[in-house]
Image (spheres, rainbow, N blue to C red):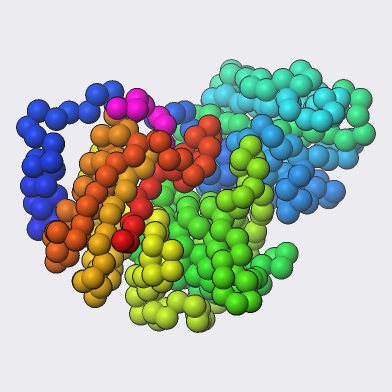
Amino acid sequence: MGNANPFAAAAILSLLIWAQGPMATPAVAQTPAPEDLFAFSAGARFVAKPDDADYADMAYSPYALIDETAFTDTRAEGGKAAVYVLELPEQTEIDSLAFDTGGMSNPEKSVKAVSVEISDTSMNEGFETILDTELQMDRDDQRFALPEKAVGRWIRLTFDSNYGAENYGMSGFHGYGRHLTDTANIDNVSGTYDGASGWGTVHLKQEGTRVVGCFDYRSGLIGAGVEGRMLKGEMIEHEDDGAVALHSLALFAFAPGNQSLFVLSRADDSNPEYGYDSFWSAEKVSDDIGDCPAIPGWRGKAASSQLGNELESTGRSRLDGVNFDFNSDVIEPASYPLLDQVAELLRDHEDWKIALEGHTDNIGSDEFNKDLSARRAAAVEAYLVSQGVTAGRLSSQGFGFDRPVASNDTQGGRALNRRVEIVKS
């Protein structure tokens, strides 16, 4: 995953001192938002659902419970218990729960009697009830503090009644507390996957903190970066003539063991009120990465090959996989291998002028985020210079949260907004 580079660190420090001056300090630091541990963006996934609930039906998918938006709801047949089981990526201590029943076209679908159980054993056994209550109709953010903290990895949610409609409906299910373990690492995901619902065969190659790949459906390409327990990045579908048909931003989650892949994506032209418009899943069938013909350097340095193609065709690319310490412009050492590939790509194209753009989420003040994004972009610039890229070809700028590409109202959207982009001119 790469080791600290003393030369790069010295170059970064020198550039930052020059750029900021000795008295430059951020104004108001960020404070982390409370993490919804049941959110898809936190690595949670469903392992059981009612028979009539379809994961891929984005109008009423079970994932509407954990997509962090209030504009979609899950739906299950009323008149009998509807049971969902959520698997968390880590052993987790839960101290409070919250439910959303607002925003549905028929408020009478709102779940009334609901119970929540937790297990630290498996998805099938060892459950203990931690909440048994009634919810109000058409109301979001119904919060319940647990009398005792509950520990486990599997959460069973049961709907038992509603307010009179034929089907149950709920638009959000949230859990708060803390992870007790830190084992859900995104590593060794390279291989071939069998995709469901028309996705076709998926090939992935992981190079440090960068994962690139392709899929059969519409000659698709994937470019994503590791951030915590997730991958975040892009999916691009193509027409028969090679033109871009659809560009989507996506969050990628893996089940423990990294053998099962789950994706929520949202196309650029989708309704901005909706967090995601597509669900994808695939099972790993081989460690062999197969072939991605659209990425010429697939068997070599796939990340730089794909980035080079994007810069040639669109003039811009996200550097997902370049990560920083929280509230800091210090590049995480695991990101060095990706930046080394970027540096090599730029050395091979001496005629390119490159701008590095820093972008943040909206946690913290505008002043702080503008400063932080500028310092992060400058840190990437300095690292590339340290790796032999001519300084005069590079520039950097920070935009803070002025140019979001996803909603800052959700932690998944905020993750997609935190990025450095590379722009060719």
User: In the drawing, does residue 198 fall left or right of residue 290?
Assistant: right
Q: Which residue is rendered at x = 57% and y = 51% of the image? A: 268
User: In the drawing, does residue 370 fall left or right of residue 362?
Assistant: left
User: In the drawing, does residue 294 fall left or right of residue 108?
Assistant: left
Is 362 within the magenta?
A: yes
Whether residue 157 is visible = no
Predominant secondary structure, magenta span: loop
Give the farthest residue toward the front. Answer: 425
Location of the C terminus (image quadrant):
bottom left
Where residue 94 appears, as percent x and y from the top left, is 54, 30
Q: Which residue is rendered at x = 11% and y = 47% of the image? A: 15
Residue 414, relative to residue 190: is it above or below? above
Per the rendered image, the range of residues in magenta is 361-367
Q: Which residue is rendered at x = 81% and y = 39% of the image? A: 75
**In the picture, residue 99 is in which quadrant?**
top right
Where residue 330 appears, as percent x and y from the top left, is 22, 45
Q: Which residue is rendered at x = 33% and y = 57% of the image? A: 422
Is 349 within the magenta?
A: no
**In the picture, residue 19 is in which quadrant?**
top left
Tell which of 49 and 197 is nearer to you: 197
Location of the N terminus (image quadrant):
bottom left
Tell which of 276 and 37 is nearer to you: 276
